[in-house]
Amino acid sequence: MSEYVEHEGNGLSVGVVEKKSFTFAHPPSEMTLENGSALGPVTLAYETYGELNPDRSNAVLITHALSGDSHAAGYYHDDDDAKPGWWEIMVGPGKGIDTRKYFVVCSNILGSCMGSTGPGASDPKTGRPFGLDFPVVTIGDMVMAQKALIDHLGIERILSVVGGSIGGLQALEWCLRFPDVVISAIPLATTPKHSALTIAFNEVARQAIMADPNWNNGHYYAGAKPDLGLAVARMIGHITYLSDESMRQKFGRRLQDRSDFSFNFDADFQVESYLRYQGAKFVERFDANSFLYVTKAADYFDITRQYGSGSLVKAFSRAKAKFLVVSFTSDWLYPTYQSRAMVKAMKKNGLDISFCEINADWGHDAFLLPSERLTVLIKSFLERVYNEIKR
Amino acid sequence: MSEYVEHEGNGLSVGVVEKKSFTFAHPPSEMTLENGSALGPVTLAYETYGELNPDRSNAVLITHALSGDSHAAGYYHDDDDAKPGWWEIMVGPGKGIDTRKYFVVCSNILGSCMGSTGPGASDPKTGRPFGLDFPVVTIGDMVMAQKALIDHLGIERILSVVGGSIGGLQALEWCLRFPDVVISAIPLATTPKHSALTIAFNEVARQAIMADPNWNNGHYYAGAKPDLGLAVARMIGHITYLSDESMRQKFGRRLQDRSDFSFNFDADFQVESYLRYQGAKFVERFDANSFLYVTKAADYFDITRQYGSGSLVKAFSRAKAKFLVVSFTSDWLYPTYQSRAMVKAMKKNGLDISFCEINADWGHDAFLLPSERLTVLIKSFLERVYNEIKR
């Protein structure tokens, strides 16, 4: 394990990692999507940490949220800044998802802009970026693509699919679409279907992007990008990731670099500066069309509709996985009552289910923040599930 | 009282009303604003219902919310559609604010676009609309302008100032700025200061407007208006006016005019259609710059800072009014805990205070919806206060 390095603040790290990619569904064997259209070739960016054991029983799949990527842990060799993966606090040697024990795969999603096929990718038919010619994909399509990757990696059964937020939607979809593949799942801060409130926020964010003239009906890759619209979309998102309480603690009514009001439309308050900064930073790394596609997929996601003819209990009758469901008290984007509804439906099906609502002020974002509680929950759940299949 | 007419669903109405206006602060006697600049002449649009009694003791001032206007009750003669005033359910003969007993004044606010001086008004210096040359006004400035109107109407003491949301901010400001004028106040669904969350929503809405190239730094009156940006701003607002529960009841995941998903970026869900419609409708009647100015004034509002050196208790030590404070359980824009904090500070000052948290699913909007409870509360409070001064 000499590759592991000590990294300040994050404990041991998997160290230098490499972003890989897998391409499949080459024409004429394209992937058939849920909307009936064909897509191919399809590329998924992914990373792996740790080693697949000889009986291939230790694979953990991490699924990421809206703007995430395959870089869950470690550092890129060519990156001077050595920015750690987005779940460095959870994934690594001895951590919640222990890379000494498990072979961890993190896959970017179909429709994203982080190395996988999405609206910014080149359309084989035209040689130009798809733009809105990219088909509207679903969470199911994302999982189908991940399944091809998992097959490619020689994994027949997945010890656990772990993801928060939109990553949690993928974890649930995995359990219902491939019940014989998934041994366990850890859906964090997520929901069986978006509420009207969550759809509303996503729709307004999409409208902000589409209102930007640079968006140009999705065809902007050769020119100016809809940065202003995407920044507004991101700001809306950031509000929903926090909570009233966390914003009060973090910002309150504190002024930014001034002792009195500006009496103009500058950012007077720290919370305004924070949102403007988050918006401006986001447009450097994310594609506006991908934002549209991923949020739409999430809004469409509804396991009661897809698998249960309207019944959540019926939907989970397909599942065979053991579950660890975690929600956070101040998460108002995917509130606890939605997790509880899932848990109830799981229990009615006699599933092996652990549920925990973690007391946290930090809103939806809490699932990504350091939490000894969450780390211990995930670590012991994975150990138990692993020991049970080894018996 | 032959002018009163029966109107379907709303009971008796004050009937046909007339929009009036009052202009003051003519140069060289301009109004001095809180930011130090001078503004004049200033026009306020207003309406009155009922009659001022001989001893001028029955005046009730209604203060409106963000996008409201002076048309609180009745119908315009020249309006074929006969759209009732925005608080027709509360204001009229025999209603919560009884126009048979009280002389009711509703004043549009400084900075608005509904007949009063605001960024869309003509700048006397240039003869063109102010745009961003309009000074950033405060809730205090709005109340100073209303005071000039009240003086003009010959009212020395106001029986009650009644307003919800940003109208509630004005009601509070009235009590602290003119403690000897205001006999009572009814701040509804409001707050002593905007939380970071509320500022955040306002800021994102402003950013949506300013991201629209048609906004043109506020100078758009001669050309295309920033309709797309303003529509997004309004959609954000509408989400905050509702609640998770009310949106679930009102929309759930119901699809709009279709049985399956569109698999494109049309409005699939009813909640999406609703928001798009609200956005499109709003731009027909409201000015984007006024949206910026009024939200900024509301964000600046902070009675602890202005009147209490940071203490809410100290701020209310100035007040002499009797208060009826009302909050609504599902209002997450101005949550009950903020009203409770006010009430506590009022009580510590020995003020005559009634407080009620109304059980309501409809979020912030609840203060504008029919509620027998709210009607009775307001009616009996006004009666009591009126009887007490008559004793």
Image (cartoon, coloured by chain):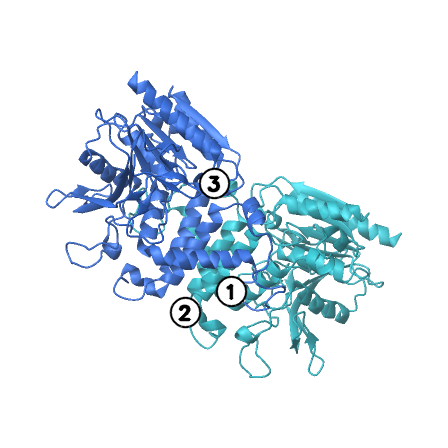
Chain colours: A blue, B cyan
Question: B184 or B309, which lies in front?
Answer: B309
On the same chain, marks 1 and 2? The answer is yes
Q: Give the chain of mark 2.
A: B
Q: Residue furthest right?
A: B391
Which residue in the protein does label 1 denote?
B285
**Closer to viewer: mark 1 or mark 2:** 2
Give the quadrant of residue A216: bottom left
**Closer to viewer: mark 1 or mark 3:** 3
Which residue in the protein does label 2 denote?
B213
Q: Answer with left or right where residue A98 lies relative to residue B361.
A: left
Q: Give the chain of mark 1.
A: B
Q: Answer with left or right where residue B347 lies relative to residue B131.
A: right
Circle on res. A284: none
Q: CA distance from mark 1 to mark 3?
A: 40 Å
Q: Residues within 10 Å of mark 2 (few under 14, many from 20)?
A: some
Q: Quick one: SS at disc 2?
A: helix
Residue drawn at the location 53% of the way across and 74% of the way down: B131
Residue drawn at the location 89% of the way across and 52% of the way down: B391
Question: Is there a contact, CB below 8 Å, between mark 1 and mark 2?
Answer: no
Q: Give the chain of mark 3.
A: A
Residue drawn at the location 30% of the way across and 60% of the way down: A217
Question: Is there a contact, CB below 8 Å, between mark 1 and mark 3?
Answer: no
Q: Answer with left or right where residue A124 lies relative to residue B153.
A: left
Question: In which quadrant of the rendered image does the N terminus of chain B lie?
Answer: bottom right
Mark 1: amino acid: Arg
Which residue in the protein does label 3 denote?
A366
Tell me if residue A18 comes above or below residue A121 in the rendering.
Answer: above
Q: CA distance from mark 1 to mark 2?
A: 20 Å
Q: Residue furthest front?
A: A2
Q: Earlier in the sequence, mark 1 or mark 2?
A: 2
Mark 2: amino acid: Pro
Q: Answer with left or right where residue B190 lies relative to residue A205.
A: right
